[in-house]
Image (spheres, helix red, strand yellow):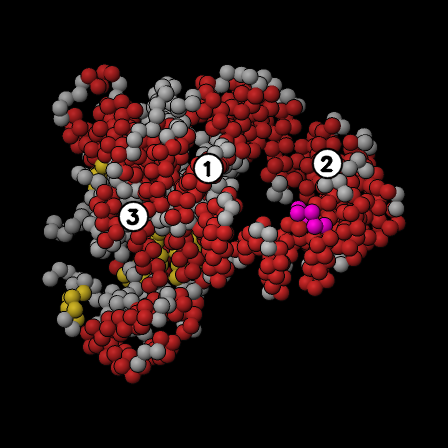
Amino acid sequence: MNKGEHTVLGVHVEDEQNARTAPGIELGRRIDEGRARAGLSQEQLRIQAGLGRTTVSQAISPRGPVPSVDTVTALARTLGLPLGKLLQLQWRAKEEEQRVGITASAVGAPGRPLGQWEPHELEVHPAGPDKDVSDPGTPRARVLPGYVQRRHDRVLAEAVRDSAAGRSRIVVLVGTSSTGKTRACWEAVQPLANAGWRLWHPFDPTRAEAALAELGQVEPRTVVWLNEAQHYFGDHTFGERIAAALHRLLMDEEQRPVLVLVTLWPEYARQYTSLAAPSGDPHSQVRELLAGHMETVPDAFDAAALTAAATLAEQGDRLLAEALTRARDSGLITQDLAGAPELLRRYEQATGPARALLEVAMDARRLGVGLHLPQAFLTDAAPDYLSEHDYDQLTEDWAELAYAELAEPVHGKQAPLRRTALRPPRRPPAPATSAEAAAQRPAGPVVRLADYLEEHGRTVRRRLCPPASFWHAAHTHLTRFEDLRTLARGADSRHRLQWVYHLRHRAAALGDTSVLSFLAMAHEEAGDREGAEGLARHHAVHGDTHTLVRLAELRQQAGDREGAVLVLQQAAAHGSTSAVLQLAELQEGAEHQERAERILGQRIDDGDTRAIAQLVQLRHDAGDGEDAEARARHAACQGDTHLLSLLAQLRENAGDRKGAEALALQAAADHEDTDPLFRLAEHRYKEGDRTGATVLFQKAAAHGNTYAMALLAGALETAGYHERAERLLQQVADRGNTDIIARQAELQEQNGDRKGAERFLQYAADHGHTPALVRLAALRREARDREGAEQLLQQAVDHGDQSAITPLARLREEAGDREGAEHLFQQAADHGDTRALADLVELRERAGNSDGAEALARHIAGQGDTIALTRLAMMREKAGNKEDAEALAWKALDHGDRSCLVRLVIAREAAGDRIEALARQFADQGYPRDKSLTSQRLRDTLLKLWPYGLDPDGVPTPPWQPIASEFLG
């Protein structure tokens, strides 16, 4: 029997800390069978039994601790199970645990005691050669250099103290490769070892799968070790679920205390915490988890840390002494200790074939391919990375020699490209996914690129598009769906459209149904309607009818109503409720109407409140206004009054103005909801019925609608009824809504009533709304009352409104007081207004201090804000200094901001300049692919230049068509 395995009452167990005895397993099985018979999920059972989530999960699990008597009693009563038999099993399970020496605190808990871990098992970088030991028979000991504490160590220490005191904490260390993040975490948790804490490093079969599978089983007093957390949060299948589970773990009273330690590279931290694109939010849970918990680990030691390291070196720490001799000037001590300089030297001095393999691996990792790179893929991709000379010198065994060269370790610990192995799956695959799982495992050996070289590649090769052999080898050898999808996205962002299609086609041929929608759209755009429908139907067979519905939308937009109906009918046949509802809109007939109503009724029964509005509109459009009104009134009685507003608008649109008004008035009277009245008034105002709108605004105001009061005040002000207007404004102010008065001032200004706007702004300011002073100052400035504007802005600043500092500084600049303006911009920046520093950059540029402007812009960018670089680049572009503008845009890109180059390309296209060279360079490094307006405009520009995309070498791709989808049969 293997180490760690044993038999308990005839049950073979791999690890006694992770399994129950036979009575405990039987107890969990009976509870779980009772849950299944009752038709309850674990969450529903938890709620009905009044128990914690972890308590229920562990009670059912064959690997969790034996539940308490109270837990068994609560579950038995909830499920109607025989309590006596379950308690007998519970007693026997506890007795057997004591007999075989299994304690409840150890059973089922992920990880092992912290003191049993060795730092290198947790991915602490080795440093220097192994230390010789006196006994030749003893393995050579791994040594660590002395540890130098820095600012982030204080944050970790505080989190450890909180955890020891019983509070759950999370700390996220953000830093580049080999900066000491993992070592810092290791040093921080040592005080917990003597307190009996465990440490869990989720790893097998993959990091993400292991984390999600066992997070619910984490015991109190456990360190959750998420090193290189992009392997957890970046997983497109599990990442968000892992973040949600961690958040739940940190909040769970029953599992406190736990300490979650996370390390991340900066680029991943930016990716996970950036604001969501309009097209979707792939990292919302991760962003929420990380918010407020990130601590930066600097690349270099500062003066204090270097002094501390020197002291340790003087006390005999040889490793630190050697590192200081090599890296003291740069401060990159941890990188040196981790072997980074030697790795870099090995890359730069490698033979041609070895360097080519490293660059393939660098490109694969920076474009998102997984850690384990198939050796066959690297070998097949390498030829186009070789110079003509190196390619001519290749021998038959070139690959074998190159891999051997790259496998030679640095300091005996790291290698530029090392052979690795995928761990075999430990759990039986689900029958439905066994074929897919087989396709996911690469054939042949796999290798892994050294972390430091991976990050170095992201920097030095970021502007390069991989050559043709890379894409061909990826298409030929890669089998993981995620790798193929990620590379397709990378090809798309580089405008390599033909490879986008072929990589997705390859993924689909291997069984990845998630790409079928993209392929269907490609066939539809190419005019292959039959192929598009076939792919969409294939997608629907696998449970996703969205593609068919999207095809119908495209055909309807193109004016092909009949084609849209045919595709919607196919989607409806596969169970798409949205297709049924759209068919009811496009086609007349009782059959479609009744089917749509049945679906909406079912959705309402399931608690979908949006379906009520759809049903009301459907009944109204079908001519049954009485039923629509009854449903809307019923919903209003239940607290959902927005349906009355919808119904009032439907009646208004149908010409029933009295009926619409009656509904709106009833909503105000019966439900204290004036929104229907207000919306109806707005609609009549836009339609030109000023009199009818005013009457409704008056009625809404009479029922307390402050927006209506402000609008009426505006109308009275414009008509000259200043006192009546002021009385209404006073009512608005009394309700604490001075911001509404300020917004109404904007409307007065838009309607040409400048004096009224100023009176409203002054009124809002007099009642404590200081932003109104800033806007009022702007009006005074436009009227060339510079002195009055400055007084108002100073008044706003005196009241604590920092937003007034920047416009005040601009006034000083216009008056010729550049020194005073610069002082004010700096003051605004000191109060957290980062845009003020960008204003200061522009001030220096306008003053002719180009060097000072650029130096400040680069300094700001180094702190993570590139807006100054972007604004400076566009100023240089406007001044005709295109070379400088382009250099600044690339500098912004170096700091992770692509938007500057996007704006530059768009600006040059608008000016009629030739943009092919810049656009091609931008495409080579990849541009943002989201739904933002600038991104869409850039894509339109590239499609106009190169409608069929670019080849990997940047040459325009000749016309091509999507190929037949033979994998569909």
In the rendered view, does 763 fall on the left or right side of 459? right
Amino acid at dot 1: Glu
Numbered label attached to residue 109: none
| Most foreground residue, 671 or 812 | 671
Decide which of tag 3 and tag 2 comes sooner along the chain.
3
> What element does badge 2 sit on?
helix
The vertical placement of 257 against 876, above or below, is below
Q: Position of residue 153 (x, y in %)?
A: 42, 51
Q: Residue at x 12, y 49 (%)?
A: 136
For disc 2, the marked residue is 808
Decide which of tag 1 and tag 3 comes sooner along the chain.
3
| Most foreground residue, 573 or 710 | 573
- Mark 1 and mark 3 residues within 8 Å of each other at the beta carbon: no
For disc 3, the marked residue is 123
> What element does badge 1 sit on?
helix
Q: Look at the image and tell me in which quarter the N terminus lies.
A: bottom left
Numbered label attached to residue 562: 1
Amino acid at dot 3: Glu
